[in-house]
């Protein structure tokens, strides 16, 4: 398997575009994105568990309940959530897109991201749809830009691999910077692939994968109302269609996992105001649940996140977060180390502090990617979770987001 | 019942003191506090649920397991947690205090607060204990200062009330600013009363009360390792001893609740970096559990906290936090208003936005105490929770706490 360029247009038969249609006031920001498959594709999705759900999530879930989709339409700048006419507007977005593409409105995945509780005006979308369709091309980055909100970096990745001698590709784009604490699904992620796979197996692969990828990311503990990950698989790689578990399915899952893992790290590293990507790697756990609970508790701790911002090796906060995680652990067996490109340093052994060089620790923690290594020394299970530091800029961005 | 001055020395027979003994480098900060009852007092305590427990918590729990205590010794600047010799040091603190007071070491409540994982040197305590005992007086504020860490305000309160014609008093001090997200207990709170009450009834009153007071406070979602609330009741008010439920017990519980509620608001309003006290008042819930879950989820939401800092009426974040709280609510019935001394404004009705004046909302949110009113319109249960805004200074304080 290798990482390739092209993002969501890397796989055969996918075009995309992103434009500024006028939902956002800032004319330099694209606010409408479209992804289209040449052929109708098997489709799968996972969605937020928040009881307050974005209207587009409800419409999308219904639209792809037959297992198929042809296009994704997504706007940024307004979440179309908590609006009395939300469902109607989301459906209008589908109709406009379907008409412009000459396809069925039920084959559209619709998504929105931005402010909650402000009515979404359909006019800019109506006015922009022709330009959006006209500009469809094999450059996925325009669509990746179109779904960004407070993101500072464009998030796209693609991989190529082989199934039964056929070259296959999976590509994905993501947005997500604040209100990131997914559960069952996450922020907005759109994945395209030319692999031939049944809708059932596609959903199975996606549902399983998010548990160790997007569900292990947290920026601020707030689970968004509009989280959504969808995959479209159009079969144009011409591999023998995957309809059951086996070698081909495993290869597909591994490739999907690579794409998702990359997007997770991009999302966490570009958390609102973040200066650092934090990875928490838990090992030696009694079982998977304990490993995951501990990893996620540490990655969510405001105090740990603030310490990482300050490059302060305050490992007591890591222990504290393990202690209140709810996981049943023996605290007297816990070892903690900090690791980055600058090296690795043990700071806690058997639940108590060890002598260590504050200078070396500082050097390690000044890097942009930091791994907090936790060994529970009680078993063989492990887990990874991703997050970011808590900074002045997180507060700044969120102190007055709407203006 | 009326609020009176005197804090922990308001009740008959309690003296206190606080000094700088040298645990902290800053010589202007008191770091050792002592509270002493003239007579052995009935004692009760509640403690952190964090699996990583401060050594003093373990020693205190054991010491007052017989239901009695005479004094509290507490240092700030070091939590004496995650240290190999922690228990030994906590016991030494008891011995030093008991010897200086001429009482039994098992009658001591010992507590520590500050950095986790750095060995606590007993020497400054040993050197300071004589001065500490010598200075015992009826001014509780010195002890209140002695337990402060990043607190910016001294937290003390007292009330007087009558039981069976006898004047009774309850007073309390608290510290707590960061790592505040108590569960079953909270930060450090020491309460004194001259009411005559059995240990059993004292524990019953305390355990019940913290559920609606300290357990409903959150500054940053981090449950500390050293949380502790203790009460000493020395009986010197000479009321007929309370040994069962009834009118006298209810009067006592009400007075205790008043003291605890005041301390809660002080702790939340003085959250690390806070500029505002936030209160979330949930009504119309199906049951108490739903009301509490919703109130606490909103008060814990980083995005809501940051919006309050910016005086931004971004009510969508409140809805979002209700939606992911885990409580089973009908989101289409939710009303949300913001309230402060400047007025009250409805921003969301039946789960959707209403037209409101952004200017009036801003005026309301610029006040120092803000109430987020949530009516679930689904029943009669209600709950209160307290927290604070998320500010640049929270990040600053926690980015490099140890230096």
Image (cartoon, coloured by chain):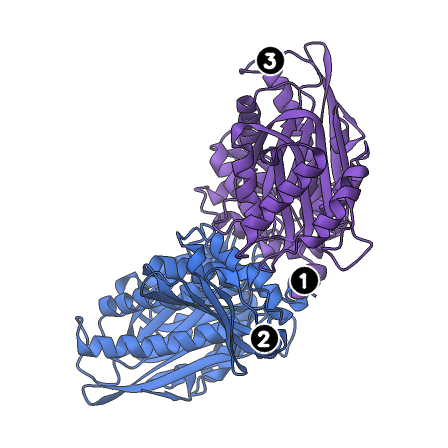
Chain colours: A blue, B purple
Res. A121 in view: no
Q: Quadrant of the C terminus of chain A?
A: bottom right
- Front-most of B14 and B5? B14
Which is in the foreground here, disc 1 or disc 3?
1
Indicate the chain on which mark 2 is placed: A
Measured in 3D between alpha carbons, the distance from the residue under mark 3 to the one under mark 2, in whole angstroms, is 59 Å
Residues at badges 2 and 1 in contact (C-beta under 8 Å)?
Answer: no
Q: Is residue A258 depicted above or below B333 in this figure?
A: below
Read off the residue under disc 3. B247
> Depth-wise, is mark 2 or mark 1 nearer the camera?
2
The image shows residue B364, relative to residue A311, as above or below, that is: above
**Dot 2: few (<14), some (14–19), or many (≥20) neighbours within 10 Å?**
many
For image coordinates 73% across by 56% down, the residue present is B24
Q: Residues within 10 Å of mark 3 (few under 14, many from 20)?
A: few
Please state the chain letter of the residue tagged with numbered disc 3 in the rendered image. B
Residue on which the image places disc 1: B401
Q: CA distance from mark 1 to mark 3?
A: 47 Å
Residue named by callout 2: A361
Q: CA distance from mark 2 to mark 1?
A: 15 Å
Compare marks 1 and 3 and give the one earlier in the sequence.
3
Callout 1: helix, strand or loop? loop
- Residue for point 56% across, 52% down: B86
Q: Nearer the viewer, residue A394 or B178?
A: B178
Q: Are tags 1 and 3 found on a single chain?
A: yes
Q: Which mark is residue B317?
A: none
Q: Position of residue B211 (x, y in %)?
A: 54, 35
Callout 2: helix, strand or loop? helix
Are the residues flagged by discs 1 and 3 in contact, CB closer than 8 Å? Answer: no
Quadrant position of the N terminus of chain A in the picture: bottom left
Q: Secondary structure at mark 3?
A: helix
């Amino acid at each position: 398997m290798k990482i390739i360029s092209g993002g969501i247009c890397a796989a055969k038969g996918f075009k995309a575009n992103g434009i500024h249609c006028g939902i956002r006031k800032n004319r330099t920001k694209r606010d409408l994105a479209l992804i289209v498959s040449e052929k109708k594709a098997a489709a799968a999705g996972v969605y937020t568990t928040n009881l307050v759900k974005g209207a587009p999530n409800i419409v999308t879930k219904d639209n792809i309940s037959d297992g198929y989709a042809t296009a994704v339409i997504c706007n940024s700048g307004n979440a179309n959530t908590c609006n009395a006419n939300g469902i109607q507007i989301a459906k209008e977005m589908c109709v406009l897109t379907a008409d412009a593409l000459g396809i069925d409105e039920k084959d559209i995945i619709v998504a929105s991201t931005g402010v909650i509780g402000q009515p979404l005006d359909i006019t800019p979308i109506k006015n922009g749809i022709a330009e959006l369709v006209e500009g469809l091309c094999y450059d996925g980055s325009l669509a990746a830009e179109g779904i960004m909100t407070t993101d500072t970096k464009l998030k796209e990745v693609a991989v190529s691999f082989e199934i039964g001698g056929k070259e296959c590709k999976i590509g994905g784009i993501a947005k997500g910077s604040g209100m990131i604490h997914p559960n069952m699904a996450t922020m907005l992620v759109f994945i395209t692939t030319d692999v031939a796979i049944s809708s059932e197996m596609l959903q199975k692969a996606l549902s399983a994968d998010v548990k160790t990828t997007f569900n292990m990311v947290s920026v601020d503990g707030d689970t968004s109302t509009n989280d959504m990950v969808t995959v479209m698989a159009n079969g144009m790689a011409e591999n023998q269609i995957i309809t059951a578990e086996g070698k081909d399915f495993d290869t597909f899952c591994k490739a999907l996992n690579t794409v998702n893992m990359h997007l997770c790290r991009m999302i966490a590293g570009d958390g609102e105001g973040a200066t650092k990507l934090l990875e928490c790697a838990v090992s030696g756990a009694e079982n998977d649940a304990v490993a995951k609970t501990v990893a996620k508790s540490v990655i969510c701790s405001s105090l740990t996140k603030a310490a990482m911002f300050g490059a302060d090796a305050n490992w007591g906060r890591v222990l504290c977060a393990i202690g209140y995680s709810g996981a049943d652990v023996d605290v007297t067996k816990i070892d903690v180390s900090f690791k980055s490109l600058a090296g690795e340093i043990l700071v806690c052994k058997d639940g108590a502090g060890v002598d260590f060089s504050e200078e070396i620790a500082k050097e390690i923690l000044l890097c942009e990617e930091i791994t907090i290594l936790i060994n529970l020394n009680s078993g063989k299970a492990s887990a990874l979770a991703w997050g970011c530091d808590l900074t002045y800029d997180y507060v700044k961005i969120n102190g007055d987001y709407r203006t």
